[in-house]
Image: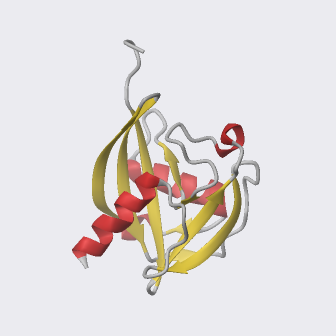
Amino acid sequence: MENKKPGVGFGIMLMKGDKILLGKRHDDPEKAQSELDGAGKWTMPGGKLHFQETFEDGAYREVMEETGITINKEELKHISTTNNIVETAHFVTLGFTCGDFIGEAEVREPDEIVEWKWFDLDHLPEPMYFPSKQIIDVFNELK
């Protein structure tokens, strides 16, 4: 544990009016691919920053890989930075919003995310992945 270092991840709030796109992570923790206890929880598109990748390029890549949606990187807005620590992992999570994109959400990684759905911000599903919930909470505070 002493040589471990924090990772950098991000979540992207894709917005369509007052609706947000969320994906249901696989119930099997091995397939959900989350070091922050995400199995069976609803999450926004996102993932880990790659070496020498800009935040915008990482967000674009993750949204495309997970959903098939193409975001407009120019409209990506950084709204939060959180320090997410659990017993086995540590991530600095960057939260972004984006309302300018092309395409419809498809399940592109069925072993990780089993479905994508649009939800009203006032009626979010449970259980929520806590880093995604933190980003949504900051968004609601900024409104």
Q: In the rendering, at what x and y percent does residue 10 appear?
A: 43, 50
**How many numbered dots are placed on residues in this image?**
0
Residue at the limit of the structure toward the top, as seen here: 2
Figure colour scheme: secondary structure
For the C terminus, the image quarter is: bottom left
Q: Which quarter of the picture shows residue 78?
A: bottom left
Picture layout, residue 99 above or below residue 7: below
Picture layout, residue 18 above or below residue 97: below
Q: In the rendering, at what x and y percent does residue 23 appear?
A: 61, 63
Picture layout, residue 26 above or below residue 84: below
Between 46 and 68, the one lying in front of the other is 46
Residue at the limit of the structure toward the bottom, as seen here: 17
Answer left or right for 61 relative to 94: right
Q: Looking at the image, can residue 76 be seen? A: no
Between 9 and 59, the one lying in front of the other is 9
Residue positioned 54% across, 66% down in the render: 126
Residue positioned 54% across, 61% down in the render: 127
Q: In the rendering, at what x and y percent does residue 18 appear?
A: 44, 85
For the N terminus, the image quarter is: top left
Picture layout, residue 1 above or below residue 76: above
Residue positioned 50% across, 55% down in the render: 129
Q: In the rendering, at what x and y percent does residue 69 appear?
A: 61, 68
Q: Which quarter of the picture shows residue 21?
A: bottom right
Residue positioned 30% across, 74% down in the render: 140
Residue at the limit of the structure toward the front, as seen here: 126
Residue at the limit of the structure toward the right, as seen here: 110
Q: Looking at the image, can residue 60 be seen? A: yes
